[in-house]
Every structure is written in C-alpha cells, then in structure tokens.
Amino acid sequence: YTYCLLGQHIQAIKDYDKAIALNPDGAADYKVNRGCAYMGLGQYQRSIEDFDNAIKLDPEHADALGNRGIAHLNLGQYQRAIKDFDRAIHLESNNAAAFITGRGAAYANLDRHQRAIENYNQAIKLYPEYAWAYKNRGISYNKLGQSARACVDFWKACYSGECDSLGREQKKGFCKDP
C-alpha cells in the first residue's frame, strides 16, 4: 500500500502478487489494492480484471465496485461506471464521497450536468472539504452557463488544495480574486 502512495506502482504490484499467491481465496483486499496500482499506471483494463476477481470473492466489496467504476470512467464506459458507483454507494463505503463524485463525473461526461451537480452536492454534504467535488461541480456549472457559480466552486476547490481549474479560468479573464 505504501508503494502506491509513493507512486511506486510496479513495486506495489510485485508485493500484491506475492500476497495473493500466499492466499488466493482470501485476497480480495489485495486484489483491490493491486487493481488500484494498475490504475496508477494507466492500465485500466488490467485493473478491472483485479476488481472483477475481488468482487467474485466478495460480491459486496464496496471499494472493489467503486474502484472498478473509476476504471470504467477512465475508459469512457460511463454507464458501467454509474452502475458500479451506485452499488458501491449503496453498500456505504468509507469512500462514498469519492464514488458519488465519480458518478457525477460519469453523468457530466454524458452531458447530464444537472444530474452531475446533484451528485457533487451529495458528496460535498458528506465531505465539505472535498476539492474534487467542488472542482467538478464548477465545471458542470460552466457547461450550464452559470459562470458565477462555477467560479465560487473553483475558489472553494482551490482553498481545499485543487487550484488548476481556477487558474485556467483566471487566465481566460474569469474568476478574479475575491
């Protein structure tokens, strides 16, 4: 796990391979973690295989479902992502805010921005400092022509550490300093 946090995904995969080999039938968490390492390398299809295997071992593994949703999202498989996020959220994962935000991103990619905003609102209610929810909600507000609301969210995202959208808007002459 530490290797993944350090961005050393290949070493993490090697360690998870060893752990899975020692206990293949009880390795759902290791398969989820290895799947996340593959996502860190941009190998989304390979990560889905690990998440699928974890779900076979534990059909109610919320993190396996949610992370598989993230992989589907990255592959442009938005309906599949929404289905996985729905199941993960229903199981009340500790990562619910992230999965709700992911579901919102899937809706946004389907040009269903109002539905996306509803999801971002829900994520923010669970985790008021969640920068990605503010950033993504701001992007959806922009798509709906609500630039003032978008700027408010970009500032909130920046206060929580995610300033790239605010910077882009400021370079275009929008979202001036408050």
Image: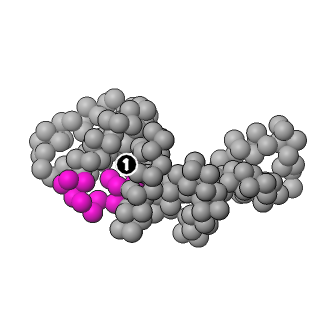
Disc 1 packing (10 Å; few <14; some 14–19; many ≥20): many
Specify start and end residues of the magenta stretch as a single range: 55-68
Above or below, comparing residue 75 to residue 132 in the picture: above
* Figure quadrant of the C terminus: bottom right
Q: Which residue corresponds to mark 1?
A: 68
Please identify the quarter of the rendering in which residue 94 is found. bottom left
**Camera-side residue: 137 or 95?**
137
Kindly identify the amino acid type of the residue bearing the numbered disc 1.
Arg
Residue 83: x and y, percent?
40, 58
Q: Is residue 63 magenta?
A: yes
Q: Is residue 64 left or right of residue 115?
A: left
Residue at image coords 65%, 62% = 114
Residue extending furthest toward the top = 10
Residue 77: x and y, percent?
45, 44
- Please say whether residue 63 is visible from this viewpoint: no
Q: Is residue 52 left or right of residue 70?
A: left
Say how many tags the image has.
1
* Figure quadrant of the N terminus: top left
Residue at image coords 82%, 57% = 148
